[in-house]
Image (tube, rainbow, N blue to C red):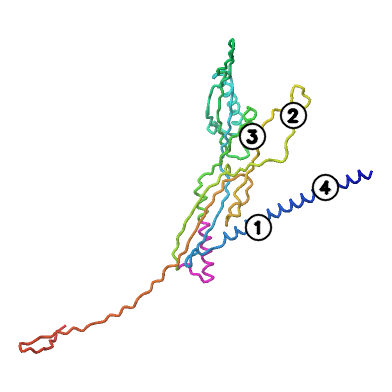
Amino acid sequence: MKHASFLLLISLLVSQAFGQISVDNYRQIEFNNWSSNQAQIKHQLNQLKAQWATGNDVTMDINLLMNVEATSYAAIFNVRQIAKTSLEVNTLLNSRIETFKKAVSEAEITDNNIIVEIISQVPIYGLKTSKKLFSKSQNEVPIGFELHKNITIIFERYDALNDIVFEASKSEIYDLVKVDYFAENPFQYYDTMRQILTSHLDKLEKRYDEVGVDLDSFDRKLSEKTSAVYPIARYTPYSGLTRMSYDELLGKNQELSAPIKTIVSPSMYYDYLPFNNFDIILHPKVVKPSIQYTMNMKIRFTQKPQVHLKTVTKTEVEKKFFMITEDGQVKLIDVIK
């Protein structure tokens, strides 16, 4: 009994020790993350400060972000079919595609907004073993064909994507390659952003004037840089902590065994551009993947060199004319001006 109590006491002490180590490690990780975040915030605040390039220059640097909801979308599906003959593989795949097209047409998607693109049609080879008296040989022989096509569906309502994916699954089309986002006349957004930034620069210039810095006496140079970030570039992979169980799918069906093991690819989520790198954000409430337009406007004020004027004194010299006579005398001649 004493021996059992002693072992129990050791177990508790070891558990507490490991528990304390885990807590300490966790706290250390949390502290490191906090320190890293504080350093990043400090760096960002320093970046926001106006800095003098030289003793005679000042630079204003402003970043603007505008979130814009797309006006139309394009979902691209990949579909493939395998059959023994070229005719059979085309017939089977075209039948699936036509069923899919008919289903999405009921969701107000016309044939003009459905594009079918052939990607490849290649033969499939198998190995045929030929037996000889003292040896075996294997040769490649065609056993069928594999056909790949892409289907592009253009639609205007973002919520329609769920219905499109559902109808695709009915035709055994499961591979959603990507979704593209489009916005009509993007130049109008850049014009709006340019007006806002110009107005903001004017306000900053007035603030400098209020503290005694007259920027009107400075030469100025203006630069502008724009970009557009689409949602397809902002999806980030992640691995979930939970895994699904297939037991319920198998049920009591004795003909089914455990499902085929496949490589579980990480999932993805939409991670829009962070706002902390921008001074002005238009439409900051992002409820769905959006097109993000950015504009950077930088203006540099350089003090004009001072010009020193020299005083020029004009000296007039009086001219006199003399004549030497025959007897060698010098006489002054009056000249009528």
**Classed neighbour count for the residue bearing mark 1: other residues with Cα under 10 Å, few (<14), some (14–19), many (≥20):** few
Under mark 1, the amino acid is Gln
For label 1, the residue is 38
State yes or no: discs 2 and 4 in contact (Cβ < 8 Å): no
Select label 2 or label 4 by which is in front: 4
Cα separation between marks 2 and 3: 24 Å
Residue 246 shown left or right of residue 102 in the figure: right
What secondary structure is found at the residue carrying circle 3? Answer: helix
Q: CA distance from mark 2 to mark 4?
A: 42 Å
Upstream in sequence: badge 2 or badge 3: 3
The magenta span reads 195-216
Marking on residue 161:
none
Q: Earlier in the sequence, mark 1 or mark 2?
A: 1
| Front position among marks 2 and 3 | 2
Q: Is residue 208 magenta?
A: yes
Residue 148 against residue 289 in the figure, above or below: above
Residue 48 magenta? no
Residue at point 58%, 43% (across, down): 231
State which tag comes first along the sequence, 3 or 1. 1
The numbered mark, 2 or 4, whose residue comes first in the sequence reads 4
Instruction: Give the percent coordinates (x, y) of residue 83.
Output: 59, 20
Q: Residue furthest right?
A: 1
- Within-10-Å neighbours for mark 2: few <14, some 14–19, many 20+: few
The one nearer the camera, 275 or 331, is 331
Q: CA distance from mark 4 to mark 3?
A: 56 Å
Residue at the limit of the structure toward the top, as seen here? 133
